[in-house]
């Protein structure tokens, strides 16, 4: 028997603090929570229900889709299209936006999501997650076009992720701090277990895919070299490294015990005209919002992620986020390198 606060209770109590709130937003969050519970169940059953492996198709990014990428995208669409809170949705798995079908009422919000981030990890039974971001629909319940989504991250009304790990967790911000909820499988409810999550300012743990080292820009190489030099190097301390290849799991670790996560711009990306690996609208922005709300910093190395003015729905950006002092150090290294290059 639990006696904690359920996520529904938490969201309703938050709503009461907002004058004039209609309950629309609360109800939208509840539908997202339901979608994440369904996805959690699917991911948990895995091969028992035949959902692992490749679907044999490619998404808009030219990446091979897993069966679970397609199934979880459908879960999100079906859970969130009917209730009248949204005007349109956009996802990593869909080239075009998804306008709410005409048989349903249209609402005042837009939803972007990555239904299963880190899905290359599903076949090997490593943690994956769902990332989402809620924006206001400009104009009143009109049929929005792609441009309606192109709002900077500072405009987000809420953002969150579900982490499908040893426990399933939901971490949420509505711009008033960050709170974490753990799914109690026996009663099917997320219970508040991690209130007011904050990121330690200092860390001795970094996360980056070192196989790309030879392609990195000098400031990133400098930062990682200094970490690797450990107690004998300029930092005078030993550092630890982690790389899960599931951004949700990395961000969750950073929210729990601090750290820095980097997927920087590199020469390989530049050569093919890409501006980063991770997507702004449904990966970098929601995670940036959560990180900032927990006291951390989220940057491209040259700009605050939430200030990036989006040009495209599926735009990619470099991502450097986590503990304040380490991220600021990497940003300073970028500024130094850029001013030396300009001199
Ligand atoms: P995805 O959205 O196709 O799953 O890609 C995003 C994931 C992140 O979760 C993770 O940080 C990164 O890709 C891992 O990339 P890599 O395989 O290059 O290390
Ligand atoms: Mg992703």
Image (tube, helix red, strand yellow):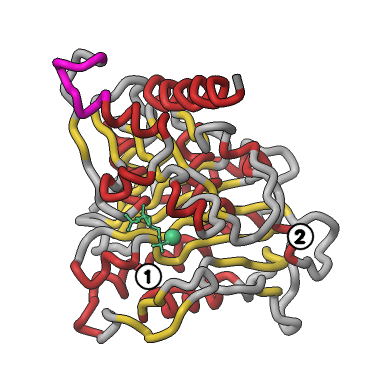
Residue visible at 27% across and 29% down in the picture: 225
Image height check: is 246 above or below 177?
A: below
| Ligand 1 quarter of the rendering | bottom left
Residue 181 magenta-highlighted = no
User: Which of these two is toward me, 199 or 96?
Assistant: 96
Which structural element holds mark 1? helix
User: Which of these two is toward me, 329 or 221?
Assistant: 221
Dot placed on the residue nearer the N-terminal end, 2 or 1: 1
**Does ligand 2 reach within 8 Å of label 2's beta carbon?**
no
Image height check: is 66 above or below 24?
A: below
Residue visible at 40% across and 45% down in the picture: 263
Give percent across and percent down for residue 274.
54, 56
Horizontal placement of 303 versus 208: left or right? right
How many neighbours does mark 1 have within 10 angstroms: few (below 14), some (14-19), or many (20 or more)?
A: many
Residue 233 magenta-highlighted = yes
Q: Name the residue under label 2.
A: 147
Identify the mark at residue 324; answer none if there is no mark: none
Q: How far apart are marks 2 and 1 (CA)?
A: 29 Å
Q: Name the residue under label 1.
A: 39
User: Which of these two is toward me, 44 or 322?
Assistant: 322
Name the main secondary structure of what is drawn in magenta.
Answer: helix
Which structural element holds mark 2? helix
Residue range corresponding to the magenta coloring: 226-234
Which numbered disc, 2 or 1, marks the residue closer to the eye?
Answer: 2
User: Which of these two is toward me, 26 or 133?
Assistant: 133
Horizontal placement of 95 versus 290: left or right? right
- Tell me if residue 295 can be seen: no
Give percent across and percent down for residue 61.
51, 68
Q: Are marks 2 and 1 in contact (CB under 8 Å)?
A: no
Horizontal placement of 192 versus 32: left or right? left
């Amino acid at each position: 028997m639990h006696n904690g606060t359920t996520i529904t209770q938490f969201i309703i109590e938050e709503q009461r603090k907002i004058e004039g709130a209609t309950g629309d937003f609360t109800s939208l969050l509840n539908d997202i929570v339901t979608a994440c519970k369904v996805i959690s169940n699917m991911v948990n059953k895995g091969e028992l229900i035949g959902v692992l492996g490749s679907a044999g198709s490619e998404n808009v990014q030219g990446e091979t889709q897993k069966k679970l990428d397609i199934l979880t995208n459908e879960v999100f669409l079906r859970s969130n299209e009917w209730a009248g809170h949204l005007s349109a949705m956009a996802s990593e798995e869909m080239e075009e936006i998804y306008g709410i079908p005409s048989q349903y009422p249209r609402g005042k919000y837009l939803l972007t999501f990555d239904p299963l981030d880190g899905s290359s990890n599903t076949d090997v039974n490593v943690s994956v997650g769902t990332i989402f971001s809620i924006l206001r629909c400009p104009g009143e319940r009109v049929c929005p076009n792609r441009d309606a989504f192109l709002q900077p991250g500072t405009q987000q009304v809420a953002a969150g992720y579900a982490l499908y790990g040893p426990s399933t967790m939901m971490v949420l911000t509505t711009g008033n701090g960050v709170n974490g909820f753990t799914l109690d499988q026996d009663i099917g409810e997320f219970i508040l277990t991690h209130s007011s999550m904050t990121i330690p300012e200092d860390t001795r743990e970094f996360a980056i895919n070192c196989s790309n080292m030879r392609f990195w820009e000098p400031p990133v190489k400098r930062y990682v070299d200094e970490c690797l030099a450990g107690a004998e190097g300029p930092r005078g301390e030993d550092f630890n490294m982690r790389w899960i290849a599931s951004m949700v799991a990395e961000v969750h670790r950073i929210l729990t015990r601090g750290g820095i996560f980097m997927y920087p711009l590199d020469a390989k990306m530049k050569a093919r005209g890409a501006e980063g690996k991770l997507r702004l609208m449904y990966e970098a922005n929601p995670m940036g919002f959560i990180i900032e709300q927990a006291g951390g910093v989220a940057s491209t190395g040259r700009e605050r992620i939430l200030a990036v003015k989006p040009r495209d729905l599926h735009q990619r950006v470099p991502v450097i986020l986590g503990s304040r002092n380490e991220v600021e150090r990497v940003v300073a290294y970028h500024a130094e390198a850029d001013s030396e290059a300009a001199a």
